[in-house]
């Protein structure tokens, strides 16, 4: 598509048409040695070595982001980040993403340009190539991202591999995005750090592969909240995960939000989702640098079935996020 | 998830929750040797040989289907079919799909069950495994499907490979889905064959790989209309594609729809989209059995630039479908 750069930013998608939207989303993509066929044909062709790991996430306007809270660039970045985090949690190295872009016809080109800038920036940060996708009309802006990657010769790190005696460790932040949501929901824009965390998660890129290399026995990314996501590990592994409350420090912005909202800061840390930290289990002594040990894995027993405890007890507010609003 | 089969079909997604929706969508999936890790972890792991081919399609309620026109099973089938067609058009063999399922909370479980039946049936017909995905809330039912496959040692068949002297051949139907749309739009339900074609395309599974094996020089699937999609081949290859009107037969249901609506049946055949036939170019004499030769490839010249002609002339109504409604 020639000339798309010359179109005015105020032009709507209805005015410029589908091909110009595709041209905007794919303009200036850097070449990558493993991308044999990029955007523009019926499919993309990638060089992959060994087993392929894939995951898909859909981000829907007013469900995963709000246009009033996030800049277009934030939305583009978040769509890539949350998806690559899933591959990190498999111990894989992400190499490519495929994008479904659905938007209302009245959206302006400048919005797509800014979203594209964020999308491309996060792809660069994560080391992945945008290789293709689909563009379609919709009522609500919706981004569907599929990520592809490889295991570099290692076995995948599943949720089911945690063993009694392992330690539980965390890489990345929890509670920040939830604190940001609490702030934004009340109409505030600060503390700025948690608002930014809600807009774009800081995924610890490369740390999933490093954890796999170090021998992680099980791993998840924290999308629904630490207790909820470790609950998946506990039930898939048939173990008790027991966290130590005093292993967590309450960072200053979370203290501020807790003080302002009356929330327990540990509720934020333990049940807040959307930060996409990595939580993994390791044999004691095998925890890689930069990970914080926050608990241990125990066998189920007469006192406790498979599940997550904090200091040996059930955490009172341990509910994850349900997309359809069902009680858990 | 135990017990999801026992839930009443009238229960809403809000009542049963996200995990029950996932359990419904993935219940009873057949095992597949190349699926090393299926649904239920952070990502799926697949065995792939050689370069990977991937494509993504998003189907949005009231854009790609209407709930009043299609059964839930049709929608599930269509989502897989249109996507696998893209891999066929690359000459690839599809092996797996990843699903993004976005639906309103008031949707009933029985709808998901019926959609799942169609989804699984079409996966079986196409020879692909459903390996994972994402479930989320949305206002409009939206299915995002990413297909993955391999090339079985062949190079991909691109849009850019058509050469002067090649012939153009077609495998599958055109005009049927458009005729069905014309009928449904007027409030009718017959001829039944075209209505069914609008609901679920009949993708010629395996014929893309067969065409590649036979030496197809370029290929597309016909999603936007034969003239529009061959237009992509013509411009990517820098050639003139000249179709012969009398190479097409007007099937009986298309005659009936044309007679009832006053449309030119050749408009349906040449510009109707959504049947996902395969259109390819071959060296003369290399056309595989079952394909219909409908035209030839010529060099651009002083009389004609890269593009598609019918009997040497521009077809008057040669506009494809634009998702944002832009004029072409």
Image (cartoon, coloured by chain):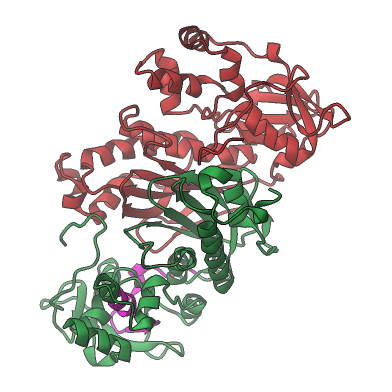
Chain colours: A red, B green
**Count of number-bearing discs:** 0
Above or below residue B136? Residue B320 is below
Asked whether, in this view, residue B274 is left or right of residue B208, the answer is left
Q: Is residue A62 left or right of residue B147?
A: left
Q: Residue at x 48, y 79 (%)?
A: B207
Quarter-of-image position of residue B308: bottom left
Residue farthest to the left, as pictured: B303
Q: Is residue B308 magenta?
A: no
In percent of width and height, residue A133 lies at 40, 54
Q: Nearer the viewer, residue B25 or B91?
A: B25
Q: Residue at x 10, y 78 (%)?
A: B303
Seen from the viewer's position, the closer of residues B255 and B188 is: B188
Query: Residue A121: in sight, yes or no?
Result: no
Q: Is residue B281 left or right of residue A288?
A: left
Residue at screen point 62% across, 23% down = A317
Q: Is B179 included in the stretch rendered in magenta?
A: yes
């Amino acid at each position: 598509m020639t000339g798309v750069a010359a179109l005015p930013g105020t032009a709507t998608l209805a005015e410029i048409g589908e091909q110009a939207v595709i041209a905007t989303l794919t303009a200036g993509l850097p070449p990558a040695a493993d991308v044999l066929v990029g955007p523009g044909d019926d499919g993309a062709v990638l060089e992959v070595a060994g087993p392929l790991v894939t995951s898909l996430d859909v981000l829907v306007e007013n469900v995963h982001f709000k246009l009033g809270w996030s800049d277009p660039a934030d939305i583009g970045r978040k769509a890539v980040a949350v998806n690559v985090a899933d591959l990190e949690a498999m111990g894989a190295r992400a190499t490519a993403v495929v994008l479904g872009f659905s938007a209302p016809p009245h959206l302006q080109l400048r919005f797509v340009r800014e979203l594209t800038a964020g999308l491309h920036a996060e792809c660069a940060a994560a080391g992945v190539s945008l290789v293709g996708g689909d563009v379609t009309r919709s009522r609500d802006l919706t981004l569907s991202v599929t990520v592809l990657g490889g295991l570099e010769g290692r076995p995948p790190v599943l949720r089911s591999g945690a063993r009694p005696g392992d330690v539980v460790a965390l890489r990345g932040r929890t509670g920040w995005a939830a604190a940001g949501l609490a702030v934004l929901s009340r109409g505030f824009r600060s503390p700025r750090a948690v608002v930014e965390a809600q807009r774009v998660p800081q995924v610890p890129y490369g740390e999933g592969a490093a954890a796999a290399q170090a021998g992680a026995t099980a791993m998840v990314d924290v999308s629904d909240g630490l207790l909820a996501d470790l609950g998946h590990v506990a039930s898939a592994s048939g173990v008790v995960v027991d966290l130590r409350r005093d292993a967590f420090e309450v960072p200053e912005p979370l203290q501020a939000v807790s003080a302002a909202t009356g929330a327990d800061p540990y509720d934020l840390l333990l049940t807040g989702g959307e930060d996409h930290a990595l939580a993994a289990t390791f044999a004691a002594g095998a925890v890689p640098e930069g990970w914080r040990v926050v608990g241990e894995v125990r066998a189920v027993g007469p006192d406790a079935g498979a599940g997550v405890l904090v200091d040996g007890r059930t955490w009172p507010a341990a509910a994850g996020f349900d997309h359809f609003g069902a009680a858990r």
